[in-house]
Image (cartoon, rainbow, N blue to C red):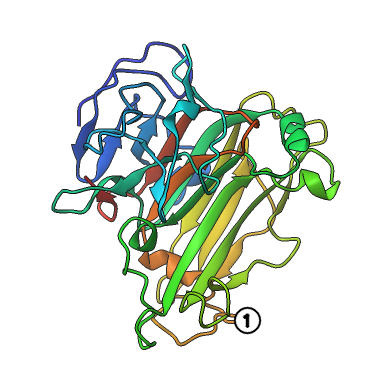
Amino acid sequence: MQLFQCRNFRRHCVASAAVVAACGVSVIAAAAESPPWAAAIGYTANTFSSNFTPATVDAAKSGKAGFAWYPWNLYGHHADTSALKFNADNSVTLMGDTTGPNGELVSATAAGNAAKFVGTAFGGGAYIDAEIKFDPQDVANAASKGWPAFWSLAMEDSVLPGGTQWPGQPPGYKHSVEVDILEYLYLPYNVPRNIYGAGMHDWYGVPNVTCGHGLCAQHMQPQEPKRITPAGTDFTQYHHFGFLWVPATGTSQGYARFYFDGQVMGADRRWTKFDGQPPPPANQPWVFGRLDQQHLVLILGTGPNEPMSIRSVNVWQASGANNLHQ
C-alpha cells in the first residue's frame, strides 16, 4: 500500500487525493491510528480514511471508480450535488438536500460495470468514525424536516437489489439491518440539546404486504438509541461519532457499541449468531445478527437549512478481506 506524507499534525492527517485500491482497502488520506478500543479487538487496519475534496467526492456524478464518496442514488432518488460545499480545510458542508431521503453522500453506488457498483461497503466487523459538526438551532428552526445524520444500509438491498432474501421464506421476503451512528432527531421532542440518536433497525418482510405499508421492523427498546453526551456539549464544534461492530461466532456473542469522542454511549446491544432462523426477530437472541452477513454502505445527509460539516471518516478492521470494493 502506498504511504502518504501528512500535511499537518492532526491525528487524521490530510494527504494526497490519490486513491489506492488493494485487498478491498480505500485510502484517500494518510492512515489514521487505530483507537485503543478498536485495536484491542484486532481492528488495526485503516481500511478507509477520507477527507473531502473534488478529487474524493464524485460531485460530477461520473459514476467512475476511484472516489471515496458518491451522490445518493438509492431507491429512485438522486441527490442534488449543488448542496455540497467544499471547504478550504478539506472538509465538506452538506447544505441539505430536498430531493428525497436524508442522504446526500454514500460510500458506494450502483454502476454499469461488471460488478454493478463502485465504491466501498464494509463487512466482517469494523470500527467506524466520523468527525462532524452542526448547529442544533438550525435543526430546531427546520421543525424536523430531516436532520444531521451519519448512517448505513445493507449494500445487498440499497445498491445491489435482491441480496436480502430471508432464507426459507417466500420470494421477496427481505431481511436487513440498518445502523444509525448519528441522528440528531431528538430535539423536536423537547429533550436537552446534548442528546442524539444512534441505534439499529432489523427490517424484514415482503414490502407493503407482510406488515401493510413498507417493511416490518424490530427496533431497539424506546430509550436504547438515546445517547446522552456531557451537559453543555457544543455540536457547532467537531466531535467524533463512532460505531464498533463485532460479529457473533458459534461460541461468542456479537455486539454493537456506540462512541462519542472516545466515550461509550449507553449499553452494548448483543446478539447470537444468525443462521437463517425463521421470522419474526422480535424477542429473539439473534435479532440484529443479520448484520454479520451483510456489507454496510456509509451515508451522510442532513435536512434542508440544517448545514452539517464533515472533516473525516475512518474505518478500522481486522482486514479489508470481507469488504466489497470497486
Q: Quadrant of residue 70?
A: top left
Q: Residue at x 43, y 11 (%)?
A: 8
Going by the image, does 79 lie left or right of 309?
A: left
Give x and y (percent) for residue 154.
41, 59
- Quarter of the image with the C terminus is top left
Give x and y (percent) for residue 24.
24, 45
Of all residues, the one furthest to the left in this rendering is: 114
User: In the image, is residue 166 above or below residue 69?
Assistant: below
Give whichever of 134, 258 is nearer the camera.
Answer: 134
Going by the image, does 214 lie left or right of 90?
A: right
Give x and y (percent) for residue 34.
43, 36
- Tally of numbered tags: 1
Res 42 seen here: no
- Quarter of the image with the N terminus is top left
Q: Residue at x 74, y 33 (%)?
A: 136
- What type is the residue that disc 1 sits on? Asn
Q: Quadrant of residue 80?
A: top left
User: In the image, is residue 207 above or below residue 156?
Assistant: below
Q: Residue at x 44, y 73 (%)?
A: 175
Crowd around label 1: few <14 · some 14–19 · many ≥20 (10 Å) = few
User: In the image, is residue 28 above or below residue 282?
Assistant: above
SS at badge 1: loop
Give x and y (percent) for residue 145.
67, 44
Going by the image, does 1 lie left or right of 135?
A: left
- Residue under circle 1? 283
